[in-house]
Amino acid sequence: MSGSVHPAFVLLLGALFLPVLKGRMRQGLLILLPVLGFLNLLGLEMGTVWHFPFAGYGLEVLRVDKLSLLFGYLFHLAAFLTAIYSLHVKDSIQHLTGLMYAGSAVGAVFAGDLITLFIFWELLALTSVFQIWSRRTARSYGAGLRYLLVHITSGLMLLVGAALHYRESGSLAFDVMTLADTASWLIFLAIGIKCAFPLLHSWLVDGYPEATPTGTVFLASFTTKTAVYALARGFTGTEELIWIGALMTMFPIFYAVIENDLRRVLGYSMINQIGFMVAGIGLGEGMGVNGAVAHAFNDVIFKGLLFMSMGAVLFRTGKINGSDLGGLYKSMPLTTGFCIVGASSISAFPLFSGFVSKSMVMQAAADQGHLVIWLMLLFASAGVFHHAGIKIPFFAFFAHDSGIRCKEAPMNMLVAMGLSASLCVFIGCLPGPLYSLLPYAVDYQPYTSTHVLLQLQLLFFSALAFIFLKLSGIYPPELRSVNLDVDWVYRRMFPATVRTVVRAVKPLKDQLLGGGRMLVTWMISELQRHHNPQGIWGRTWLTGRSVLMAVVVLGAFLLFYYY
Amino acid sequence: METKTNDGRNDQVPEKTHIFDKPKNVKRVIWSLYLICGGLFLLDLLIHRHHSFAEGVFSAEGWIGYYAVYGWVACVLLVLTAKQMRKILMRKEDYYER
């Protein structure tokens, strides 16, 4: 098979046929498209570059190298798994936009220049928001709007950054840059928004939990990973990223502990995992970037799996809050098992996928002597086990019995979860194939006795801490609540500030309005005085006086005209 | 009580007891965790762990039980801090809808 089609177009254009098909035909195409896209990808030669002249600019719409290929494979795999997971969905809009969203992500990672990147960047935003809106609730409508606003802003920053970059360097190529000028900072922050940098992260935990059960699985796979790719492409070795990444691993885990909506807990843990990738990219070429990219690959699968299991719970029970759930292992034993595999992978248990990638980032930090960073990452590693590894399965499937009895997840969901879980274990046990896809040559052995032992100690004593806190009653109960995050600034503070300002200027406004109103009232009353039946212009005049008046006016007119 | 679900079934039949319905089984899980933790701690005495950092940068990582203690303390600190955060950050569920 020759790779003669641009990889993005298989999914982008193929998806357009989905709404016109029905039933099994649509389901078949939904699964077939990612497979076709993948086969098309296999036909692309390493090093291929496609140029496309557009309005005087030489765009590089396709650039194939190890980094873009790895993300290309990953996105097709994710699209395939998510397609299976959402087979039961009847709403064709979700299928259409879901695969177009995947196609946009594929387009973005193969973009060789900033303009092509921008186009796919915005397409990502536009196609993904439907996964939130398709929930069709007032809350999801608002969350979707906020999500879209943030992502369009990110796209505009990218565009302005690209324009400035072109003016300064005369090139639109998307390659490694340094944070030296406004252009690079704008591009950096545009990527940072999509990457959920601290303070720019709240769109993720605001939007993702409001999406449909299948929508969140789509969302978790593409947007942030495209951003991780863009960072790896443009800002490898940027020192600032080490600290940004370490912060990202730290702060969300505190939120995750007290969050009640279990999909929002996963949202926070997602930022935590992206933190490891961002730090890895900051640590630079070799082990750092390899670890980051490998972790992105694994994260799409295990985080997808966790979102799938929570989606299945939401789909079957209609509930997702930790305070409402519990005891579901009785009704959904298979989903419980798959969730535990996902939880073990994100926690980086030996033999599960997280173990073979996260440790590379840790090792890169230690090799470069970043002690504080390393301690932060180690803290976050213990913390992620605590909130994602234990909290998610525990409060959904165990804890106190909520009394909910439901059916096991539908077959297509179980198949998707089963495949994802198998991949988690496969990569965890045999990391070789994944390592061979990484951009730099790999000289790393994850399974040493030291490494296995220290990781097991870290994790089991974290579990011990959970048991201790739970038994002693210190562990905070799941409460129906929301926790304020950065989105409070634009959901509460800005509107409140506007209201306060309006209230402050109200007296002034009242005076102005009052004055105006008095003027108008006066004018009306004057008009009335002259034009009412008794007024000089309104009353009925006698014929004689009218004729006299007409003569006077005509006379005046004659005189005026004569001279 | 029941909100809209995609579940066709609503069990009224008395169901079988499940594995964690018996407190004894829960105790078993907890005790096996204690045993595993004890074993892992003792392994530090038998297996010499290699250092992650270069010689002299961070000698504490070689201490016996370093990772065990770090993991335990990290999680307790995490939860205690998060509990305090609730006092400042927690609002009613419909906070943004009001």
Image: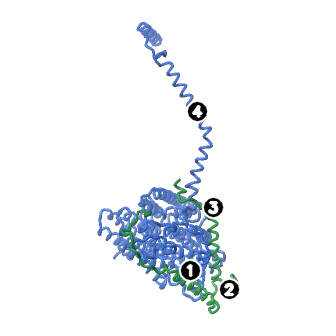
Chain colours: A blue, B green
Q: Quadrant of the N terminus of chain A?
A: bottom left
The crowd level at tag 2 (other Cα within 10 Å; few <14, some 14-19, many 20+) is few
Whether callout 2 and callout 3 share a subunit is answered yes
N-term-proximal mark, 4 vs 1: 1
Distance from disc 1 to disc 3, alpha carbons, whole Å, reads: 37 Å
Residue A506: quarter of image: top right
Label 4 Cα neighbours within 10 Å, binned few <14 / some 14-19 / many ≥20: few
| Chain letter of the residue carrying label 4 | A
Q: Chain for mark 1?
A: A
Amino acid type assigned to the residue bearing label 4 in the image: Gly
> In what element is the residue under mark 4?
helix
A503 or A287: which is nearer to us?
Answer: A503
Element carrying mark 3? helix
| Residue closer to the observer: A1 or A434 | A434
Q: Residue furthest bottom?
A: B46
Q: Which residue is mark 2?
A: B63
- Label 2: element kind: loop
Which element carries disc 1, helix, strand or loop?
Answer: helix
Viewer-side residue, A41 vs A93: A93
Gap between marks 4 and 2, in whole Å? Answer: 79 Å
CA gap between label 2 and label 1 equals: 22 Å
Is residue A78 among what the camera can see? yes
Of badges 4 and 1, nearer the viewer stands 4
Q: Which residue is mark 1?
A: A360
Q: Mark 4 highlights which residue?
A: A514
- Residue B41: percent from the left, percent from the top? 62, 87
Q: Amino acid at mark 3?
A: Ile
Tag 2: amino acid: Trp
In the rendering, at what x and y percent does residue A242 appear?
61, 72
Name the residue that disc number 3 marks: B88
